[in-house]
Image: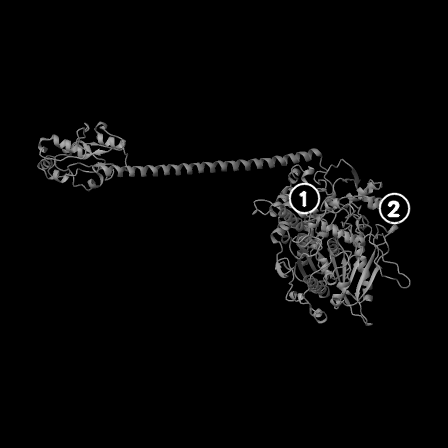
Amino acid sequence: MDEHRYLSPLEVFLGVPYATPPVGSNRFSPTRTPSPWDGVRVSDRPGPSCPQKLPDLNDERLLLEKMPKGRLDYLKRLMPYLKNQSEDCLYLNIFAPLQMDETKLALPVLVFVHGDSYSLSSGNPYDGAVLASYTDLIVVTLNFRLGVLGFLNANPAPHLKARVANYGLMDQIAALHWVQQNIALFGGDPTNITLMGHGSGAACINFLMISPTVMPGLFHRAILLSGSALSSWAIVDDPVYYSLKLAKHMNCSIPEDLAKDHEIIVDCLRDATIEELLSFDLSPPNFMTAFGPSVDGVVIKTDFAKDFLTMHSMSDFPSFGPLNNMNQNNLHIKRSDSGRRLFQNKYDLLFGVVTCEALWKFSAHDVQNGIEPEKRDRMLRTYVRNSYTYHLSEIFYTIVNEYTDWERTVENPINTRDATVSALSDAQYVAPLIQSGDLLSGGPKITPSDDDGPGRPTKTFFYVFDYQTKNGYYPQRMGAIHGEELPYIFGAPLVDGFGHFPENYTKFETALSESIMLFISNFARTGNPNDNARQEAFLPASRERNKFRGINWEEYDSTHQKYLEIGLKSRLKNHFRAHQLSVWLRLIPELHRAGMEDVASRHNLFKNHNEPDLYEGVIRPDPLARNIENDQIRRNGSVYSDTALTTVDTILATCVTIMPSGRDLQPFNTTDNTLANLEAAGYAAYSTALSVTIAIGCSLLILNVLIFAGVYYQRDKSRSRGKQTRFNEKHFETISGKHSHYHIDPNLAPSLVVDIERQNRKKMMGDPNLTNLNFKGPLDGPKSPSPTLSIDNMMLPSKLGSRNSSFRLPNVSYPQVGGYATLPKNLNQLNSSPPIQDLRQKYPLNGSADSPGREDTRIPHATLRRGKSLHPSNLPQAAIDEMRV
């Protein structure tokens, strides 16, 4: 076809055996090299898939309660490739560009390890023809043993007696050995091999990167797509538990000394039929794995966690849980004097995630309608219980707090679903993979002087795929789902889809696929996805692909954390989900580590810990409360219980529980009474501290209430004073406006109103010397009040002047008078009259030279003070009447 004119011809070899069939006595055995064949072998069809239990797609209603409709549609397209099953399944497929010349070019090799799970799928559905043709890479896909056939481990003490149990990983190593020895015959370069895996396949590659079984040079680069060895589902922390369950189901005898005679269980299961092995429905706890990679002492070492270490110090990665499982002193002793790291990363690394990794684990109803906060709590609580051991409540509330939108007053079910999907995506995929990238990319660059290094600096790149296919399996606006990037990596849009991938792609999606394939091929060829000089010389560039030409994908490091966001507008960013990842990689591990201290065991558990309504799905037994009296099995003189999945000292990694070392497998030999006493003591101390905290809080609350009451009372009192002052001033203005001869001091008690003019006039009119004066006051009338206040014994308050000064009628020249009293209107006439002059001569002013002694000449007077009156009967009746008004 014209649109496929730039796809070069290929040579395809399907169903090539890379190992001896693992049947009969070879079941549960390490992988063996294949036997040679005579003549020419026809390789035109893929080999059978490895045995696996397929879901029943006929009961869609039941399946939709466990998965979204998009996942169901995906499985329907995948199932035809998995129906052909056989234990003789160790085959690989090779897609090589056709080279007509006798001297073939040594092309880079890309080996793909499929995902989906450790017990499902195959390499056959992944057609590498378009990827190989477009990029001039040799693409290899392979099958490996799955489930119980690939990961049975009945050895309880791998630290004492190592025995191969990760048969699926051994199959992958055998396939790499075959490629290393034979790929040159297909035009490949055995010195340039890249491993690429998705999901569980990426976790397998992550284990191979640190495995001592992998020879140096077996592969050179790694591409991890949405998978890491640090995920909660990546490793089985107690594989013996599931092995014993299966052995009991198959009626196998259980040895008394399991550590010494665990091979009896393996031999019994080796004789069983494949149908019997697959018929046992062993459902692991949610977010966990029953049969998968585990510590066997051969492929995965008991202290494999330290192999993630780089030159970074321990404080740089406080969240890396497996480090707690090792003796810190021994760790530093093993380092050389130069401080070189224990494990030197020998591989270039490219890793990435999609924006919505965990959506495929929700039900169809949840995807369509959202979930309520109660179901969110059950799901997150289930994850916390199955993944952590200590401080479960604190970790749970930390997660809920981080993924709750507090700006929304009402929780919408759709928003709650999205937040829960983000939380589980970060917990199971994003955080573990970024942690692996940090640990494998950190530290100084390798120099050729490093004996155990590859003699060249390694590079690391990180991407986030943020594009949802228009005609994909899921409704739009859901985000990029787990596995959404695989069709673009394998070039499905260039040929309108193939295999189990969707069909009908847009032009932009075709250009996006071209760009991603070039990134992958550049990295596989040189270790740098930006090198595109060769492709531009041979391949025509579409108009849409020109949009991706200006992108410079910078390297990733744990400090700057730069990544390429691949979507409608691809761009370079940094610190993907920084705040959420800091919670998973920093805060939660610290909370979990704090619970390992001497605290009561109930403090680490949920309230009503074993109540089924608290959880959603299958939960694991409580590792801190296992009953060693039930179903006990002797092991090296100690006790092993098959009712628990972890031991008390299980150490949690960043997002995965790691199998403890041998010294940690020994159970506590403490009596039940001692445990009960310790637990009671811890609970009492905890209760006392809580009571003290509550008492202090209540005291502070009461103090705040009293302070508030005082402030409120003072404010109310000030407000009342202001109202009274304004009333006095207003009343004073009213009286002054009617009768200007009245005097009221607003600063004193308003109970005294003195009619100075009326009283003085009566006094003066009583004196025969003053009868010639004719003056009247405004209150003169036929019914004048009888009480009088004599001018001789009357003194106005001296409050407004000085305290010792007084107001006397004769001394009218005092400046205080004008401001503090209302005098008669005809005062000037009074002052100039002869009687007044005679009075002044008779009673001279105080302090004059001719005055007699002060005791004899002082005018008798009565001082009127606030609230008190020496002559209450002398108050003017007019003043009293005015006050009543």
Q: In the picture shown, does residue 159 fall above or below 682? A: below
Query: Could you tell me if residue 654 is visible in this image?
Result: no
Q: Position of residue 837 (x, y in %)?
A: 9, 37
Report the front residue among 790 and 134.
Answer: 134
Q: Quadrant of the C terminus?
A: top left
Residue picked out by circle 2:
271
Q: Position of residue 783 (x, y in %)?
A: 18, 28
Report the front residue among 59 and 428.
Answer: 59
Residue 850 is left or right of residue 558, and the answer is left
Q: Which amino acid, by three-letter code, is at mark 2?
A: Asp
Mark in front: 2 vs 1: 1
Q: Label 2's element?
A: loop
Residue picked out by circle 1:
379
Report the front residue among 236 and 82.
Answer: 82
Dot 1 crowding, Cα within 10 Å, few <14, some 14–19, many 20+: some
Q: Label 1's element?
A: helix
